Amino acid sequence: AQSVTQLDSQVPVFEEAPVELRCNYSSSVSVYLFWYVQYPNQGLQLLLKYLSGSTLVKGINGFEAEFNKSQTSFHLRKPSVHISDTAEYFCAVSLMIKAAGNKLTFGGGTRVLVKP
Amino acid sequence: NAGVTQTPKFRVLKTGQSMTLLCAQDMNHEYMYWYRQDPGMGLRLIHYSVGEGTTAKGEVPDGYNVSRLKKQNFLLGLESAAPSQTSVYFCASSYSLAGGHTGELFFGEGSRLTVL
């Protein structure tokens, strides 16, 4: 079974500063990777996804993530955050094997607080 | 553009009571899921469905039942509610990629359940 670890439960950051949210996964087979964002009292929205191809993936709202197969990581970055980026961010993994069914496994989440 | 709709959005139950959460999607997605979200634990999969008339257990299925009689609806039932089921419940749906793997999930806004 796969697991997803988000190494930071909370990340405080000043407005206009860069931010990196770390995600590591464990799997013996290839995976699809996703980052979701959850604003207060809302459901989750997709930020970006890696299915194949270029390991640098660009998403919405200026976010990007890099898939590193050797380090089994999929870290999320933004060069300059805004107050509106205050939210909780979730990394998720889906195995690329049919036996796994059609399920995503989520990390525990990283809460980002952008300070003025 | 409704997407995924959950009802009710809030509910308070007493221990031992039963209830049903309804999820409806209008995107003709094959796959539907019920997750629960608890602080620091990310989202955990309760049950899921890969098509009308089919359901399967996720990682935390005990105390819950589901049904998918129509493609657009996925019901989550609690037969005898317990305080440990106090949580925020999210429904999601997704389309299938080549090979039957799931694409990104589209989430409802959540249903907050409190069991006293």
Image (cartoon, rainbow, N blue to C red):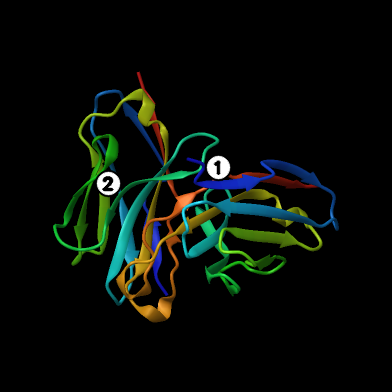
Tell me if residue B23 comes above or below residue B45 in the rendering. Answer: above
Name the image quarter holding residue A10: top left
For disc 2, the neighbor class at 10 Å (few under 14, some 14 to 19, many from 20) is many
Disc 1: which residue: B109
Question: Judging from the image, what secondary structure is the residue with disc 2 in?
Answer: strand
For disc 1, the neighbor class at 10 Å (few under 14, some 14 to 19, many from 20) is many
Chain under numbered label 2: A
Q: For this view, does A67 lie left or right of residue B95?
A: left
User: Residue at 61% across / 53% down in the picture?
Assistant: B23
Q: Is residue B37 visible?
A: no
Question: Judging from the image, what secondary structure is the residue with disc 1 in?
Answer: loop
Name the image quarter holding residue B65: bottom right
Are the two marked residues, 2 and 1, in contact with CB atoms closer than 8 angstroms?
no
Query: Looking at the picture, do discs 2 and 1 lie on one chain?
Result: no
Disc 2: which residue: A76
Q: Amino acid at mark 1?
A: Glu
User: Residue at 51% across / 51% down in the picture?
Assistant: B26
- Percent across and percent down for residue B96 are 38, 66
Q: CA distance from mark 2 to mark 1?
A: 24 Å
Q: Amino acid at mark 2?
A: Leu
- Percent across and percent down for residue A44 are 46, 45
Tell me if residue A36 comes above or below residue B35 in the rendering. Answer: above
